[in-house]
Amino acid sequence: MVFLNSGIVFSFSQNDNLNKPWEAPKGPPKKPGRDSRQPIEQIDISDAPYFAHISESFKNITKLSDLSNSEPGQGAFNEWVYYHFGRWSFSTPTWWAPLVSSNKPDTVATNSDSTVIEGKQKTPQKPGDDSKKTNDQRLWDWIQATNQKDAFVEWQEIKHPDFPDKTVELGGFKPFPANNPPADSLEVLSNKYYPFLLKLSSWLPKLEVKNVKVEDLHNNVYRLTLTVINQGYLPSIAQIGALNKWCPKIKLHVDLSDGQKLVSGKILQFIERLEGSGGNKEISWMVMGSKGETVKITIGSPMTGTVVQNVKLQ
């Protein structure tokens, strides 16, 4: 379940975009018009640098970087989160079979620590280009190298009533060994993912209010000015969220007490998007009220959290 206040959604799936980040189109982006029924099929160019940076950080933190290939999403959950729900979405398989080098047949050679299982290959392989191995080939090599007896059923001939005159064999990979990590590697994997998830959460947008200024204009009329700043790494919403209109904007609400009056500006206004790492916007109002009174200004959105700024008229 994805909630309205979700800023980032991380999921485990075969539709990876952390080892190989989604990339923006190289040519002019194809953006459907406001009234078009055509779906958005490419990430926004403004979002691409964030996907690239977080992918690089994922590989640096977890040391998981040897995923051979990933299945295209075709409407998968992580794509729905980004394209439809407008949130930052990151996904990777829980694990994948580590690469067993053909040039070192007596060891499990891998660029990651997906498993910590010592083993020997039963039969040395001929030297070859390991990078061209399919996922099934990698899984088979890993099963042989680590002697995973419960992961594969040897092929055997059976009698099938529907094919009495044919040779029928039954066997192959058991369900789920390619997707579910070995039990004795769960602690190792969790120790890799945990620091990355902590880092990912630290990149969420974070609002601060600075440069609060009160000017006494005339006859109990004051100009209030402040700057809303996003101190988080990520923008307040992904650009795709601004395009599909699914992400709430940052709301600014001025709460006036009895006897106070708004002379200029709006009681309720919105900031569509603040860039990350210091993106900011200056807002001002003119308020009539008695000296010493306080005006309460509430600023925030479900994804950024809310800050409350009390401004004293003086």
Image (cartoon, rainbow, N blue to C red):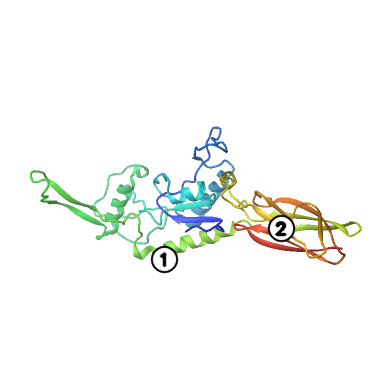
Residue 16: x and y in percent read 44, 49
Q: Is residue 162 left or right of residue 153?
A: left
In primary-sequence order, the first of circles 2 and 1 is 1
Q: Give the number of the disc on residue 305.
A: none
Residue 17 visible, this orientation: no
Residue 190 appears in which quarter of the rendering? bottom left
Residue 250 appears in which quarter of the rendering? bottom right
Residue sitting at x 54%, y 62%: 198
Is disc 1 surrounded by few (<14), some (14 to 19) or many (20+) residues within 10 Å? Answer: few
Q: Separation of disc 2 and disc 1 at Cα?
A: 47 Å
Residue 141 visible, this orientation: yes
Between 216 and 138, the one lying in front of the other is 216
| Tag 2 residue | 253
Residue 66: x and y in percent read 42, 49
Residue 51: x and y in percent read 54, 47
Disc 2 marks which amino acid?
His
Tell me the SS state at disc 2.
Answer: strand
**Which residue appears farthest toward the right when viewing the image?**
219
Q: Is residue 30 left or right of residue 300?
A: left
**Which residue appears farthest toward the top when viewing the image?**
27
Between 133 and 95, the one lying in front of the other is 95
Q: Which tag is nearer the camera, tag 2 or tag 1?
A: 2
Between 258 and 139, the one lying in front of the other is 258
Residue sitting at x 42%, y 61%: 189
Between 14 and 254, the one lying in front of the other is 254
Disc 1 marks which amino acid?
Glu
| Tag 1 residue | 187
Residue sitting at x 85%, y 67%: 292
**Quarter occupied by the C terminus:** bottom right
Tell me the SS state at disc 1.
Answer: helix
